[in-house]
Image (cartoon, rainbow, N blue to C red):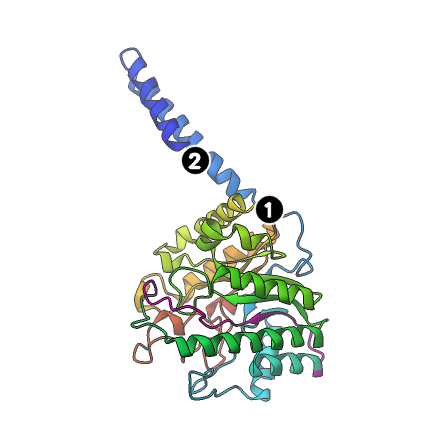
Amino acid sequence: MKINTRIRFNQLYSETKSSISTQIKHLIALCIIGLTIIPSAFAQENFRQTDNPIFNGETMAVAYSGFREGQHPDRGQGAINPSDEQILEDLNLLLAHKFTLIRLYDSGVNSAATLKIIQQHKLPIKVLLGIWLDAEISNHNSCPWLNEPISESTLSTNKLKNVAEIKRGIDLANKFPTIIMAVNVGNEALVSWNDHMVPVNQVIKYVRQVKQSISQAVTVADNYEWWISDGKALAQEVDFIGVHTYPAWENKTIEQALAYTISNINDVRQALPNKPIAILEGGWATTAIEFVEQATESNQKKYFDDIKQWAKSSNTPFFFFEAFDEPWKGNPDNLKGAEKHWGLFNVDRTPKKVLSQLD
């Protein structure tokens, strides 16, 4: 559309340049540029989903993983998990800042403890439960940080682990039906650059198994580009589309961030119409050697505030990534790596600037 408009402008300009004043030429140019820009802006401002039954109309949520300094999930030598007391402290902190919908990433011990604590203490928190999928094929040719192939024995073990994780997720969804509102099967297990690739046909089988076994809505969480280019078959299986989008990782400034996010979602909607969309990850790091100038608490606050307003007006659930900074993530020698600094709270549980005036 923009190309055709520009060609037509050149034609008009050529035909009239001998008889129209410079001022009129500028006016024509401004009008035609306006025709190019306005439809895109109009589409962004008017993106709105008519219904949001999955999360009862809730539009602003947060991704939660409670690992503190010195704690981490199982990386081959066992996990060091938060205590029940620490999880309860975290949940109360989130409630104090009006977060009543959280995302958990797996169905393991830590997530089971979180659900139990919500139930025991009658906390007014609902959950999007994750089912984590480990690699079933080696993606070493496309993943930048996989330096060698994943062995066949490891892949075989992972398949068994995934079967067990699916069962745990089903069991938790049925055990906590009033707390768990939806379940997502796999987290970025399909996008081309991941280190835990699972074939889409296998993900579809897992989704079908989960849907047959629980009453809650089921989705898959993955990058917006994957959904646009390859998501048609999977979209037919899920109850809603779970999208990840990170403007900062794509070198967007804070001034560009909201429009870029909305553009991503518009593109998903155009590729996969007639299916509800929820943004299951999006956020803004406050420290990042990868994008130093953009990684500030002020920018995080602006992105959060802008997204919160848009999510409400467009009726689009948005899970902000993430609740707390997590030092275990990324390169242990790179203390300023973005992976460690996406939290709305610091790792010591002090709030960042974004929470200072949270409505």
Amino acid at pointer 1: Arg
Q: Quadrant of residue 60?
A: bottom right
Q: Position of residue 308 (x, y in %)?
A: 55, 57
Q: Quadrant of residue 309?
A: bottom right
Whether residue 33 is situated above or below residue 283 in the rendered picture:
above
Q: Position of residue 333 (x, y in %)?
A: 30, 80
Amino acid at pointer 2: Ile
Q: Quadrant of residue 54?
A: bottom right
The residue depicted at 48 percent of the width and 40 percent of the height is 41
Segment colored magenta: 120-143
Q: CA distance from mark 1 to mark 2?
A: 19 Å
Q: Nearer the viewer, residue 121 or 144?
A: 144
- The residue under label 2 is 37
Q: In this rendering, would 352 be left or right of 236?
A: left
Question: Which quadrant holds the C terminus?
Answer: bottom right
Q: Nearer the viewer, residue 73 or 245?
A: 73
Instruction: Look at the numbered disc 1 and give the secondary structure of its residue.
Output: loop
Q: Nearer the viewer, residue 172 or 302?
A: 172
Instruction: Look at the numbered disc 2 and give the secondary structure of its residue.
Output: helix
- The residue under label 1 is 48
